[in-house]
Image (spheres, helix red, strand yellow):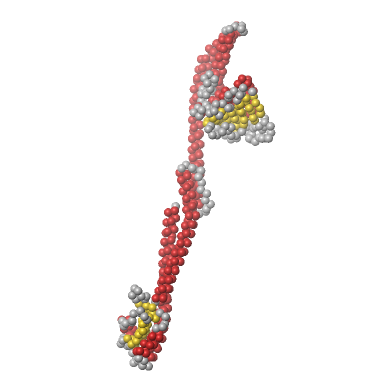
Amino acid sequence: MTNLTSRLVVLIMLAIMVITGIYDYVRLTRDRDRLIGETREELRIFAETLALAVSRNVRRGQTSDELKELLDDILSRPGLVGVAIYDPKGQLVAQTVAPGAAPPAPDEALRLVLATKQRSSRVQEGPSTQSPTLRHVEPFRWPGGRTAALEVRETLEGMERAFQRDLRERVLARLAILAAFVLSILAVTRWSIARPIRALIRGARAVGRGDLAQRIELRRRDEIGQLAEEFNRMAANLQAAHEEILHQAEERRRLEQDVEQAQKMAAVGMLVTEIAHEIGTPLNVISGRAEVLERALPPDHPDRRHAELILKQTERITGFIRSLLDYSRPRRPELREEAMAPIVARVADLLLGRCRAKDVRIQLDFPVGLPPVLGDADHLQQLFLNLLLNALDASPRGGIIRVTEGPGAVLPEEGRASITRGKVEGPCQEIHVVDAGAGIAPDQIDHVFQPFFSTKRRGQGTGLGLPIAEEIVRAHRGEVEVLSMPGGGTEVIVRLPLAAGATTTRTEAAPAAVSGETR
């Protein structure tokens, strides 16, 4: 940009110097020619007057010495460097010459004047060390009717000095003007051209690096302003296209996940069907025989505990099969307006015994005016039951499980890992379930929604809690997000769409609708 500005200024400066130099030189030359013409006219009048006086003196019979005295007196005229009188034959009669000037001598110009009786006036160049002189030869009448000549020479040294002085003054003035002009051009071009072009270059480089949010703020109505507007429009179009590509990629990723989930569901469904068919009947037989044995044995019989153990294990297997069936063939939810606080409170009451056994508290904090969501109460109860059971298993003894609402995560952003399933559209209600357990490792959090994956010890979980929760949330057109920090706990955020006409406005100053602890 600096090179462009410098070249522009240099070219403009050279053009102006050439144009103004030619103009000044022509003008000064014309002024000098005019002055020379005026001097020539003055010298002609002077020579004509002097020739009349010399003609009268010659007719009176003055000698050469007397004529020379007359010429010496005339030599006091400023600029006059020589006067000579020639007779009709071209012979020198009298002359006077200023000190340092060359003496006049008869030449072709003198003979031409004597022959034609026409005056002659011309500028005669002298040696290189002397200034040019203006030479005028004036014919006059000699006694006897013949023609003589008077030659007058006047130096143009003063005029040349004035010309050179004017030329120097013009050159210096032009240089000063050009210097001011160059500084002005540099300031204007740097402010009006270089600065916005540098902004355009920085913007282009930023866009080239991938910063599509780059914009150029130039409030101008000229071509540079239009260029900045077009750049901003181009960057906005690129940003919109980039966001659309990202959106399409995200949608494609979600679709692939849905397809993968559907394939897993189909595989689990087939597996569950086979398991239910192959295990169901023998399991019922085992359970029935164990019940018969339990009733046949007295309460204090030592083998009665074996029958009770068989019944507990068969119930466990039955519950596992039921969970598989619920996951593989979920019931379609019946959506209607539901209040979230009572549902979560009922789930907390169901877990009261397990909370007391592990000495863990469930702390509920919901404000008044919590808007209803569009959901199925039974499914939502199953959803929060799975989430609170996971939080209860992860919490240490004496820990607290917090269930709150509102936007924004509870866990700090730094150091946490996250994964999201589903996508909620429009206004939604967020419910946070936060525990103070050991958290989930970053390399494991991407697998938490996979069926049969569990971070619990073997025998403590089926790995279906979060997958079932995901299916319930997706069926409600909602979104579930898991945040976790190793050593800092886990937070599950459920986002469910609000019922039609509901808003997120609530009374902050009012007492909590559900605020308490379950031990």
- Dividing the image into 4 quarters, which one contains the C terminus? top right
Q: Residue at x 51, y 17 (%)?
A: 275
Q: Residue furthest bottom?
A: 60
Residue 230 vs residue 388: left or right?
left
Residue 326 visible in the current orientation: yes
Residue 122 visible in the current orientation: no
Residue 109 vs residue 371: left or right?
left
For residue 214, above or below residue 127 = above
| Depth order, front residue of 440/142 | 440
Q: Residue at x 33, y 82 (%)?
A: 104
Residue 62 vs residue 224: left or right?
left
Q: Position of residue 292 (x, y in %)?
A: 59, 8
| Depth order, front residue of 193/472 | 193
| Depth order, front residue of 397/242 | 397
Q: Residue at x 54, y 14 (%)?
A: 280
Q: Position of residue 427 (x, y in %)?
A: 60, 35
